[in-house]
Image (tube, helix red, strand yellow):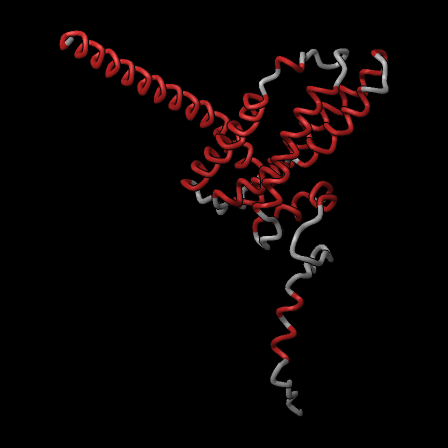
Amino acid sequence: HRHMIFPADAPQVIPRCRNIDHRTGQSGQHITVDFLLFHPFDGFWDLSREKRGSLGAANIIVFLVLLVRLLSMQFTPFLFMNVYWPSVNIIQQCLAVLLPLLFFVAGNWGLTTLFEGKGTFKDVYIATCYALTPYVILQAAMILLANVITAKEGAFYYVLEGLSLGWSGVLIICGMMQTHDYSLGKTLLFTIMTLLAMVVIIFLLLLFFSLVGDGIGYFVSLYKEVLFRLY
């Protein structure tokens, strides 16, 4: 048999093919939204293993979640959302999204790290943010729909609302499965444990700030007492 001789620059051809996923046929560095939505297992595998997601894209999705939440509160008719926009605290509404997101990511990463979870804090954050994509898309559609339908057709609005939350929830489960390489049962168990961990985190933070407030109050009272005795 004759030996095949490759040119010296042949190895340079191989890395160029790494951007093609032979399981999905997709090319490029970043995963597409439609592929992630309808092929979540392969999509989240690519996010966590092939590193085809980015922190910047995850942050953009979080920004869009905040944006559609505020737009929904401002432009959805009172028929479907009883919100008085001038009284809305934008910072408070943003924290109502960002803090639970942070607590979920921190709790999930902290627990799964102790039980052979393969995802890093960054992986969990990116997967969770990408899983919120249906919420952004459907909530934006709901804003438009709410302004053209009547009360009798309100069922369509509430179906979309439930679908936006349910679809994102399913994607979060799929994302955690692939990120940590867990089975479905183990993922569901750790999702429940993560929710409990969020409660514990909130309790510890409230306790911490309460102690800090009491400490500050004590030193302020002591300072005033010293000033009173000196003068």
Q: Quadrant of the N terminus?
A: bottom right
Going 31% across and 18% down the picture, which residue do you hit?
211
Where does the image place residue 32, in percent across and percent down from the top left? Answer: 71, 48
Left or right of residue 200: residue 2? right
Q: Quadrant of the C terminus?
A: top left
Q: Quadrant of residue 200?
A: top left
Q: Is 69 drawn above or below residue 174 in the view shown?
A: above
Extreme residue in the front direction: 231
Where does the image place residue 199, in percent across and percent down from the top left? Answer: 46, 22
Going 66% across and 52% down the picture, which residue do you hit?
30
Q: Is 135 drawn above or below residue 46 in the view shown?
A: above
Left or right of residue 187: residue 137? right
Left or right of residue 179: residue 5? right
Where does the image place residue 7, in percent across and percent down from the top left? Answer: 64, 85
Q: Nearer the viewer, residue 46 or 80?
A: 80
Going 47% across and 26% down the picture, which residue do you hit?
198
Q: Nearer the viewer, residue 150 or 60?
A: 60
Q: Nearer the viewer, residue 109 or 12?
A: 12
Where does the image place residue 145, in percent across and percent down from the top left? Answer: 82, 23
Extreme residue in the bottom direction: 2
Q: Nearer the viewer, residue 185 or 205?
A: 205
Going 61% across and 35% down the picture, which residue do you hit?
62
State the count of labels. Answer: 0
